[in-house]
Image: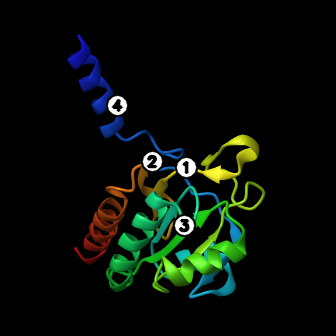
């Protein structure tokens, strides 16, 4: 019985939770403060979608172990996302000054990160914690028409980069075919 309980616990951890917004849903528009390489700017989802799909990933907190691992993985893949026509951005409920530092150090100046304040980024239902001061770990790929074509929510950073990359490549292949 003890082994069965351990097996169930392992399976519960391994199975990803449903994302806050399902595939096919319309992604809520937002405008927020972001930083790339420490330089702050305004990120507008609607403008980014005019260029192609947007890989939007939410992460709990800058400079924490899992978020640093995930940022490094996205940084390594950033040029491939760009080659496939996708814009990549990470969002967290952290203040912009902390995210500006995170964009230089952990994101390796390869992609921007921005503020996911509950008042700024609404409709994604990713905010958690007392006072909604953090976000969960959710990754989306949003097609230029604003529809979500990929969604994954799981606290482990594993699979977020490969899942979003596969979705971007599949989207691109459909457009070429």
* Mark drawn on residue 155: 2
Quarter of the image with the C terminus in it: bottom left
Measured from the top left, where is residue 98 in percent x and y?
Answer: 66, 73
* Residue corresponding to mark 4: 12
* Residue corresponding to mark 1: 136
Measured from the top left, where is residue 125 in percent x and y?
Answer: 62, 46
Q: Quadrant of residue 171?
A: bottom left
- Mark 1 Cα shell of 10 Å, populated few (<14), some (14-19), many (≥20): many
* Residue corresponding to mark 3: 63
Q: CA distance from mark 4 to mark 2?
A: 12 Å
Identify which residue, 118 or 95, lies in the foreground.
Answer: 95
Measured from the top left, where is residue 80 in percent x and y?
Answer: 32, 81
Quarter of the image with the N terminus in it: top left
Mark earlier in primary sequence (1, 3):
3
Element on which disc 4 rests = helix
Mark earlier in primary sequence (3, 2):
3
**Which-is-in-front pick, marks 1 and 3?**
3
């Amino acid at each position: 019985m003890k082994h069965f309980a351990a097996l169930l616990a392992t399976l519960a951890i391994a199975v990803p939770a449903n994302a806050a917004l399902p595939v096919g849903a319309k992604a809520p528009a937002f405008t927020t403060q972001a930083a790339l390489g420490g330089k702050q700017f305004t990120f507008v989802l609607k403008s980014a979608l005019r260029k192609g799909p947007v890989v939007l990933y939410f992460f709990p907190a800058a400079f924490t172990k899992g978020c640093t691992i995930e940022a490094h993985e996205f940084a390594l893949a950033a040029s491939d996302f760009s080659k496939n026509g996708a814009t990549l951005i990470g969002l967290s409920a952290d203040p912009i000054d902390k995210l500006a530092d995170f964009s230089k150090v952990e994101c390796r100046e390869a992609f921007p990160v921005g503020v996911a304040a509950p008042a700024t980024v609404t409709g994604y239902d990713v905010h958690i914690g007392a006072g909604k001061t953090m976000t969960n770990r959710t990754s989306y790929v949003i097609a230029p028409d604003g529809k979500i074509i990929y969604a994954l929510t799981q606290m482990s950073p594993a699979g977020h980069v490969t899942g979003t990359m596969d979705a971007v490549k599949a989207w691109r292949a459909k457009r070429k075919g």
